[in-house]
Image (cartoon, grey):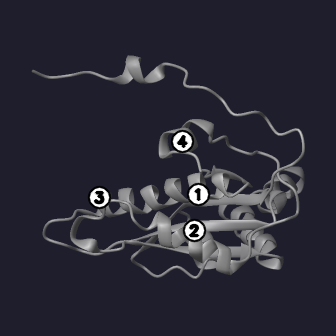
């Protein structure tokens, strides 16, 4: 079993996946682990919606309606959710709290999503987090059945890893450029 560091370093986005996908029980098992992220006041300000089958086309139609596209542009946008057999919609579920601002609650939901990408990758699935300019449009929220206190952060596109997928990468040294220290 790889260490957390090894899993993080090996993680690769999978822009193309096969038609295989984990079932709901597998996703829930991985979410049990992903939910262990730091969560100020234990609010659990997130949920995940599995989007499969025809529901992906409905999400595509909502994106097209949100964008106001027609013709070729509409067709391309409508097809985007069909790139993977499973979309996991990452939803921040926020509420007023005296010590935990909304941005921090959204950060927890994003943390769960990132942890889930690591766990899916480690389990052998191809995964890529996708967003876009219409992610938070009301028509897209409606297509996901979101409540007024819920905000879509994006989707994890999940499927089987194709043969010949890119090999694991090694650390690129970017952290040294982004790290500083105050004394």
Q: CA distance from mark 3 to mark 1?
A: 22 Å
Furthest-front residue in this view: 1
Q: Disc 4 or 1, which lies upstream in sequence?
A: 4
Circle 4 sits in a helix, a strand or a loop, which is it?
Answer: helix
Residue at 61% across, 52% down: 131
Circle 3 sits in a helix, a strand or a loop, which is it?
Answer: helix
Disc sitting over residue 104 in the figure: 3
Residue at 37% across, 23% down: 178
Q: CA distance from mark 3 to mark 2?
A: 23 Å
Instruction: Confirm whether residue 135 shows in the render.
Output: no
Q: Disc 3 or 2, which lies upstream in sequence?
A: 2
Q: Disc 3 or 4, which lies upstream in sequence?
A: 4
Q: Which residue is mark 1?
A: 119
Nearer-the-camera pick, 38 or 78: 38
- Residue 112 appears at what percent x and percent y? 46, 61
- Residue 74 appears at what percent x and percent y? 82, 57
- Image quarter for residue 168? top right
Q: Which residue is mark 4?
A: 8
Nearer-the-camera pick, 56 or 176: 176
- Label 3 or label 2, whichever lies nearer to me, is 2
Marks 1 and 2: in contact by CB < 8 Å? Answer: yes
Query: Which class describes the residues within 10 Å of circle 2: few (<14), some (14-19), or many (20+)?
Result: some
Q: Disc 3 or 1, which lies upstream in sequence?
A: 3
Residue at 21% across, 70% down: 41
Nearer-the-camera pick, 163 or 133: 163
Q: Which residue is mark 2?
A: 30
Residue at 77% across, 61% down: 81
Quadrant of the rendering where the C terminus is positioned: top left
């Amino acid at each position: 079993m790889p260490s957390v560091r090894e899993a993080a370093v090996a993680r690769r986005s999978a822009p193309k996946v096969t038609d295989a996908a984990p079932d709901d029980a597998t996703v829930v098992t991985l979410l049990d682990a992903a939910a262990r992220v730091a969560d100020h006041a234990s609010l659990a300000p997130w949920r995940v919606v599995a989007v499969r089958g025809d529901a992906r086309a409905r999400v595509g139609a909502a994106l097209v309606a949100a964008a106001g596209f027609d013709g070729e542009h509409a067709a391309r946008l409508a097809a985007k959710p069909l790139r993977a057999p499973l979309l996991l919609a990452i939803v921040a579920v926020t509420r007023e709290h005296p010590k935990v601002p909304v941005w921090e609650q959204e950060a927890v939901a994003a943390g769960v999503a990132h942890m889930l990408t690591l766990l899916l990758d480690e389990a052998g699935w191809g995964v890529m987090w996708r967003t876009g300019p219409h992610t938070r449009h009301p028509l897209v929220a409606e297509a996901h059945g979101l409540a007024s206190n819920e905000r879509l952060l994006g989707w994890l596109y999940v499927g089987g890893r194709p043969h010949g997928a890119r090999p694991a990468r090694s650390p690129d040294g970017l952290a040294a450029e982004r790290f500083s220290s105050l004394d």
